[in-house]
Amino acid sequence: MAQCDYSSRQTLIAVVMPTLESLTTSGSTTDVETNGAVSGVPGTPAMSDEALPDFTSATYKDAYSRINAIVIEGEQEAHDNYISLGTLIPDQADELARLARMELKHLKGFTACAANLGVDADMPFAREFFTPLRDNFQSALGEGKVVTCLLIQSLLIEAFAIAAYHIYIPVADPFARRITEAVVKDEYTHLNYGQEWLKANFEASRVELEQANRDNLPHVRRMLEGVAADAAVLQMEKEDLIEDFLIAYQEALTEIGFSTREIARMAAAALVG
Ligand code: PL3
Ligand code: FE2
Ligand code: FE2
């Protein structure tokens, strides 16, 4: 059992990704070239010299009304979650309020992106989309479980946002691209906040982190599945989103102190949940 040790995170991604994708795609033909275009490196985001989507089409606007709403709801919940975290870590309340303010700025930026395209965000859809993670965050908050709250908000939600925004930037309209580029930098600050707190409290947090991962990573997988069809209309590929998410998440877990083997076991929770 103990011989297999992955020497790099790339190796781990190579192991986890195909399994994760075979589980999350059903008869997908997305990696078959059908139009004679020059094939890019598999798993890399769309190149900026590819044709951009038609931002004015009804199909694009329809998909954007849900994706943009998810982003706005995510930013609002991130704001609320950092404020709530300030009640669990009172000596950090000022810093957490600063992070929360950044989330409101993001919310305003993405609201402007929708207005710029003449799109109405479908907020009821987005609220529903976040229900499992919101419910789990709220229960953890009620029980004073700061480790679980940090895993849900600072690691999972921020890694999801980082992946989504990275993959969106090359295929965004010029207005949204500028806004998203500024936002993604902040999201690293937020991920880093949780990472550093958990690193400083690693041994005391380890068991709760593993349980919180088991309880919540399957929800992230389902969220990625739930957004995939609309994301594809925006020319964002599910495989790229999964890959980018896993990179950000496992880098954070490595920094916090988990071994490669432990991270592999944690990532596997996405496959079984
Ligand atoms: C944390 O600061 C914010 C959390 C937001 C979660 C974002 C999820 C995004 C889902 C798919 C996104 C495509 C990006 C498009 C931007 C309009
Ligand atoms: Fe944000
Ligand atoms: Fe954030």
Image (tube, rainbow, N blue to C red):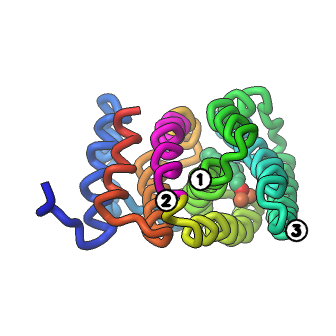
Residue stretch in magenta: 205-223
Does residue 57 appear in the picture of this structure? no
Which mark, by number, is residue 17?
none
Q: Which mark is residue 249?
A: 2
| Residue occupied by mark 1 | 151
Q: Residue at x 33, y 43 (%)?
A: 20
Instruction: Give the x, y percent position of residue 219.
Output: 53, 36
Q: Amino acid at mark 1?
A: Leu
Instruction: Report, in whole angstroms, how far the alpha carbon at label 1 lies from the one at label 2.
Output: 10 Å
Q: Amino acid at mark 3?
A: Asp
Residue 2 at x, y percent in the picture = 15, 60
Identify the mark nearer the N-term, 1 or 2.
1
Mark 3 lies on residue: 94
Position of residue 105 measured from the top left corner of the image (x, y, whole percent)? 86, 61
Considering depth in this image, is 169 or 194 the residue closer to the camera? 194
Residue ID at (56%, 42%): 231
Quarter holding the N terminus is bottom left
Q: Amino acid at mark 2?
A: Tyr
- Residues at marks 3 and 2, CA–CA distance in whole angstroms: 26 Å
Kindly report which numbered mark, 3 or 2, lies closer to the viewer in this rendering.
3
Contact between marks 3 and 1 (CB within 8 A): the answer is: no
Per the image, label 1 sits on a secondary structure element best described as helix
Q: From the image, which quarter does the C terminus lie in?
A: top left
